[in-house]
Image: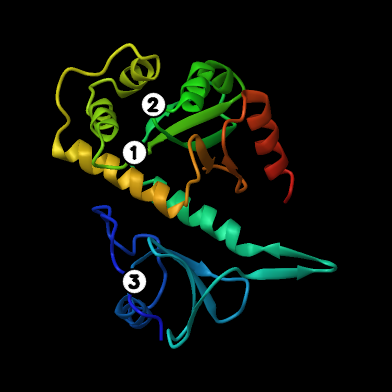
Amino acid sequence: MIKPIAVALTLLSVSAYADVNLSADVKAKIEAVGIDAFYAEKSPVEGIYSVFSKEGTSYVTSDGEYIFTGNLFKVKGAEVENTTDEFISKGMRSYIEKLDTITYKAPDEKYVIGVFTDITCGFCQKLHNDLQFYLEKGITIKYIAYPRAGMNSMVARNMASVWCADDKPAALTKAMKGDGLPDKQPTKACMDSVQNQFNAGNMFKLSGTPSGLSLKGEPMVFAGLRDPDQMLNSLKTANQKK
């Protein structure tokens, strides 16, 4: 039996099973052991579901009687493919869709990426300084707040004030350049918004910022700064795999 996992994250105010096609019986069984799923799909193995939750990825039999965790590999000749990585990307996409991201849309959009960012992060500032070049290459960027110092930090409050601004993209650009923050104090709703985004980063197991993933097309995950050409090449390569 899997022991219930302590709930340390604040949940989004959406239906927990908005993207889950599990039966009510299976949902009840996995909830009883601490798995609060919000995305699930049939795994590559017949009779087993892949389940994504704030606790991570789990695999559940169709009757809910057995649960296991870890990576699920597909044997392809002399090589193996980690199918779990792709599923995590899908689960994160589902979660990020519900977040209050700050979006800079490419005029001729070909790709969309979610980028975890911190306004005090030098590499995040560098990425944002080159924003126009990403957009010109057809890459839309959705920023996800991730104050590295934690939610009790001044950085978190400052980022929440950006997310509270009437013109969020302009406020974020100003903050990234070090040109000041919005005058008004962040509301609880804005703090909650940043908290939800911070939770997503913890689920994504960030090792630093900027990091993120593709939100359109084939899954692609990146850690650290990639310049516009590198990002475009990574996205193209990911979409040529299938």
Find residue 159 and report its image quarter. Answer: top left
Find residue 27 and report its image quarter. Answer: bottom left
Q: Which amino acid does label 2 sit on?
A: Thr
Mark 2 and mark 3: Cα distance apart in space: 32 Å
Asked if 23 appears above or below 235 in the picture, the reply is below
Q: Residue furthest right?
A: 78
Asked if residue 188 lies left or right of residue 222, the reply is left
Percent position of residue 115, x then y: 47, 36
Asked if residue 117 lies left or right of residue 186, the reply is right
Percent position of residue 6, x then y: 30, 68
The reply to whether the C-beta atoms of the residues labelled 1 and 2 are less than 8 Å apart is: yes
Q: Which of marks 2 and 3 is nearer the N terminus?
A: 3
Asked if residue 151 lies left or right of residue 143, the reply is left
Q: What residue type is labelled 3?
A: Ile
Identify the disc placed on residue 5.
3
Closest to the camera, between mark 2 and mark 3, is 2
Q: Name the residue under label 2.
A: 120
Give the residue drawn at x 28%, y 20%: 167
Q: Earlier in the sequence, mark 3 or mark 1?
A: 3
Q: What residue type is labelled 1?
A: Ala
Q: What element carries label 1?
A: loop
Asked if 18 appears above or below 207 in the picture, the reply is below
Mark 3 and mark 1: Cα distance apart in space: 24 Å
Q: Is mark 3 on a helix, strand or loop?
A: loop
Give the residue drawn at x 42%, y 54%: 203
Which quadrant of the rendered structure holds the N terminus? Answer: bottom left
Q: Which of 101 and 216 is in front in this view?
A: 101
Percent position of residue 169, x then y: 35, 22
Identify the disc placed on residue 149.
1
The reply to whether the C-beta atoms of the residues labelled 2 and 3 are less than 8 Å apart is: no
Percent position of residue 20, x then y: 40, 66
Q: Nearer the viewer, residue 95 or 108?
A: 95
